[in-house]
Image (tube, rainbow, N blue to C red):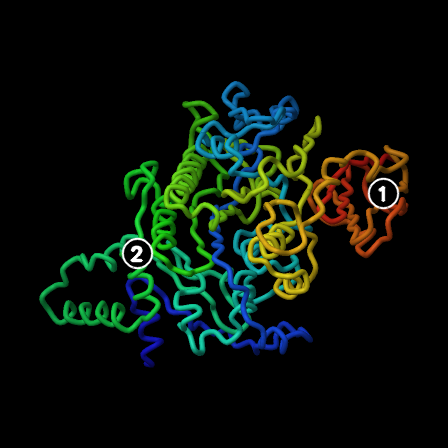
Amino acid sequence: MKRREFLKRSAPFAALPVVMNGLPITALGSPETNNILSKAFVNTDHVLVLIQMNGGNDGLNTVIPTDQYTNLSKARSNVMIPLAKVLVLDGQDGTGFHPSMTGMRSLFNDEKLSVIQSVGYPNPNFSHFRSTDIWHSASDTKEYWHSGWVGRYLGHEFPNYPEGFPNTDMPDPLALQIGSVVSTVCQGVSVNMGMAISDPDAYYKLITGNYTPSPNNRAGKELDYVRKVAEQSNEYGQAVKTAGEKGNNKSSKYPTEGENRLADQLKIVARLISGGLKTRIYVVSINGFDTHANQVSATGGNETGVHANLLSQVSEAIDAFQDDVEQLGLQDRVLGMTYSEFGRRIKSNFSLGTDHGAAAPMFLFGANVKPGILGDNPTIADNVAVNDNLPMQYDFRSVYASVLKDWFCLEDTEVDTVMQKTHQQLPVLKDSCNTSSIERAKLRQAGDAYVMNYPNPFRVQTTIRYESDGGHIVLQVFNTNAQLIETLVDSEVPAGEHEVVFNAGTLAPGTYYYRYQNGSLQQTKPMILVH
């Protein structure tokens, strides 16, 4: 066995970034590959922290549309949060947070946290594994990519990795996943761009050397050898160890170690950043959001139970981490983002739970977020069917593209290369790069004038009238199960007023949604087909 392979399997705290997927480096198929390989990377000290909420978070009990409370209560009376318990947000009438999210509410009110409403993708897959793969790879539902969006970004910036690494320009790991093995999100086109600290406890033992004593036998001597090899032979491991020794934590908001695993992971991240580690991306996670049953307590009230405990941990961890980076003077360098593989259905089930659904909110936090809520509260119908889902307002890949552009300072063509297609960008971050800013003013003008359909209700066909400010227009029709029925427009459209006819053909009568996007402006509206 080669030494590198041996270390990958035996190191107690890290997996070396040498997992090959067998794909050629030209798999992107881009005519710009040679230019990419010859360019210098963007020299930035910005850090992105990804928080994966595994299992599919129930967005409707997380960011609660109180202006839809009557209809929402009809659809999910056995899990709905009591209106009096919903946390009120400054400047937001009709929207509140789950009562367990006091820390995140404080960050929102302090303009350090933003919400992106109803994030998803067309034709959602409700398998945990497949949908997670889609979120990590940024592919379409029917595309199977073997690389992750983070891995492609890092491969774009450091195209020769791992040859010649570590080096003076980048002496540290490019990405670190804490609390689990390296996932697909860090997989590059031909090599994994990250490494993992799979056990936070083992990380602290590495720093202090305070391992559990080895048994006094042959196995113990072999264990000592493995530990010694891991400590002395892994250059990245030494870099992590050095950063951990130099770094520190200043926040008193962290819970006692072991009480909140997500907080334990984020505490490590803050310590490594403060210790000078140049790692650009950290991935942490929390499990348990697959709340088919007993999402709420049967006896303690709907504001208590499994989901409440999970949201409490997320909120507590993020609040402590943000407090820590501010006390450490790192607030201008660090951006955090949450994601989950899907949301939950509008209608609850009979087991005090919710089943796999489509769109759900995402959170971004840090000193550089555009504060507030992007998007509208989802509209809840009076009679919700068991399979009805929230219509998507924003494609999750637009969020990724916006982070690449406005946080990691890539040019538009570079963003398209990393994402492997064009995704419209969103005004989610303050201008932190010396690049052209996204047009934001038209968000304040988002009204009926931008898109409408007539007649509504309609029989057979309806005309959708829309306006363009110039640029790329996407106009799509979805059913209530979040399935894409038809893409009516997906192209550059000159400024002005335009019309397109939607023919329902043999579609069943009912409610459908049309989604319009022109750059950072989006609207999702219902239309009713009758016979």
Q: Are marks 1 and 2 in contact (CB under 8 Å)?
A: no
Residue 341 placed where, x, y %? 55, 49
Question: Depth check: 495 or 498 in front?
Answer: 495
**Residue at left 41%, top 42%?**
326
Badge 2: residue crowd in 10 Å (few <14, some 14–19, many ≥20): many
**Residue at left 47%, top 74%?**
161
Q: Is residue 129 left or right of residue 256?
A: right
Q: Is residue 414 left or right of residue 5?
A: right
| The residue positioned farthest toward the bottom in the image shown | 2
Badge 1: residue crowd in 10 Å (few <14, some 14–19, many ≥20): some
Q: Is residue 148 left or right of residue 194?
A: right
According to the picture, the residue beneath numbered tag 2 turns out to be: 244
How far is disc 1 from disc 2 in space, using C-alphas? 54 Å
According to the picture, the residue beneath numbered tag 1 turns out to be: 466
**Number of numbered labels in the structure image:** 2
What type is the residue that disc 2 sits on? Answer: Gly
What type is the residue that disc 1 sits on? Answer: Tyr
Q: Is residue 282 above or below residue 340?
A: below
The quarter holding residue 511 reads: top right
* Quadrant of the drawing holding the C terminus: top right
